[in-house]
């Protein structure tokens, strides 16, 4: 499914085409080779001091049904409504102060974010739909998987092959195909001085 976002200049197709999708085909699991590809893409992200402070919990509904259910149970209701059809969850955990570390890694969340973006772009290239979620109960998830202190479960990514947006309730159905919303570039990119809007 291509829903290319138009920009005044051409960016990479995977960046232009990626969007956070909520409609999945519940009948089509994601095989282990494909999951391995997603994880390898994530793991190739840059990180401060090459600390690689990302950890992932993989829960494919067909392979790890118990783990999939435990993750699903921690999602907030609004996310459960659509994520119930996702055949795969990947939890992104930041190793903020792993065992033996003297100090917190102040870059861990940033680095995890870059790894997750790699994963999302790889998913797009593989024709998968994906949506990251912060709407889950972190303490419950930590407990459900015995995640040690110093590790912060930050995001759950729902993944699957694209499904029919008609399966979604409104207004989610309309969001699924509506153009992606972004502020004007000049609001977020400054030309040489703070607050001076960038323009080409
Ligand atoms: C850290 C993070 C947390 C998010 N949490 C949720 C969430 O709980 N539920 C949801 O439906 N979308 C969630 N999203 C998806 C955003 O709403 C989405 O990325 C944003 O609207 C931009 O749309 P796009 O990704 O299609 O460009 C989250 C995204 C990020 C990066």
Image (cartoon, rainbow, N blue to C red):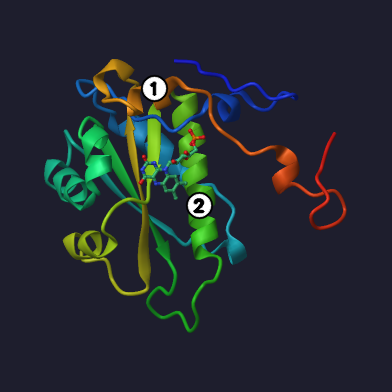
**On the rendered structure, is 144 left or right of 36?**
left
Instruction: Give the mark nearest the N terminus, 1 or 2.
Output: 2
On the question of residue 96 being in view, the answer is: yes
State the CA–CA distance, disc 1 to disc 2. Answer: 27 Å
Relative to 23, residue 145 above or below: below
Q: Position of residue 75 (x, y in %)?
A: 24, 49
Q: Which residue is mark 2?
A: 113
* In-front residue for pair 43/187: 187
Disc 1: CA contacts within 10 A as few (<14), some (14-19) or many (>=20): few
| Quadrant of residue 77 within the rendered picture | top left
Q: Position of residue 133 (x, y in %)?
A: 36, 46
Q: Is residue 5 above or below residue 46?
A: above
170 is higher (above) or lower (below) than 51: above
User: Dividing the image into four equal quarters, which quarter contains ligand 1?
Assistant: top left
Q: Which residue appears farthest toward the front when viewing the image? A: 171
Residue farthest along the bottom direction in this orientation: 102
Q: Mark 2 CB in 8 Å range of ligand 1?
A: yes
The residue located at (14%, 45%) in the rendering is 69
Picture residue at 37% right of the left edge, 73% below the top? 150
Report if residue 41 is visible in the image: no
> Is 111 displayed left or right of 86 in the figure?
right
Q: Residue at x 50, y 81 (%)?
A: 103
As rendered, which of 155 and 146 lies closer to the eye? 155
Q: Residue furthest right?
A: 192
Say left or right for 112 vs 31: right
Relative image position of residue 12 (x, y in whole percent):
65, 27
* Number of the front mark, 1 or 2: 1
* Callout 1 secondary element: helix
In which quadrant of the rendered image does the N terminus lie? top left
Reading the image, the residue beneath label 1 is 174
Picture coordinates of residue 141 (x, y %)? 23, 59
């Amino acid at each position: 499914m291509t829903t290319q976002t138009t920009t005044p200049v051409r960016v990479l197709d995977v960046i232009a085409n990626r969007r956070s999708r909520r409609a999945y085909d519940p009948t089509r699991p994601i095989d282990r080779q494909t999951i391995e590809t997603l994880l390898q893409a994530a793991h190739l992200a840059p990180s401060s001091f090459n600390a690689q402070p990302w950890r992932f919990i993989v829960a494919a509904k067909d392979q790890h049904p118990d783990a999939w259910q435990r993750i699903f149970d921690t999602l907030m209701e609004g996310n459960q409504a659509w994520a119930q059809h996702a055949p795969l969850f990947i939890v992104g955990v930041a190793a903020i102060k792993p065992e033996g570390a003297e100090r917190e890694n102040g870059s861990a969340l940033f680095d995890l974010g870059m790894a997750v973006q790699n994963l999302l772009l790889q998913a797009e290239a593989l024709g998968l739909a994906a949506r990251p979620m912060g709407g889950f109960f972190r303490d419950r998830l930590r407990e459900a998987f015995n995640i040690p202190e110093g590790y912060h479960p930050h995001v759950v990514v729902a993944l699957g092959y694209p499904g029919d947006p008609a399966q979604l309730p409104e207004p989610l159905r309309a969001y699924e195909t509506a153009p992606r919303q972004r502020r004007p570039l000049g609001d977020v990119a400054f030309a040489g001085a703070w607050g001076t809007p960038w323009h080409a």
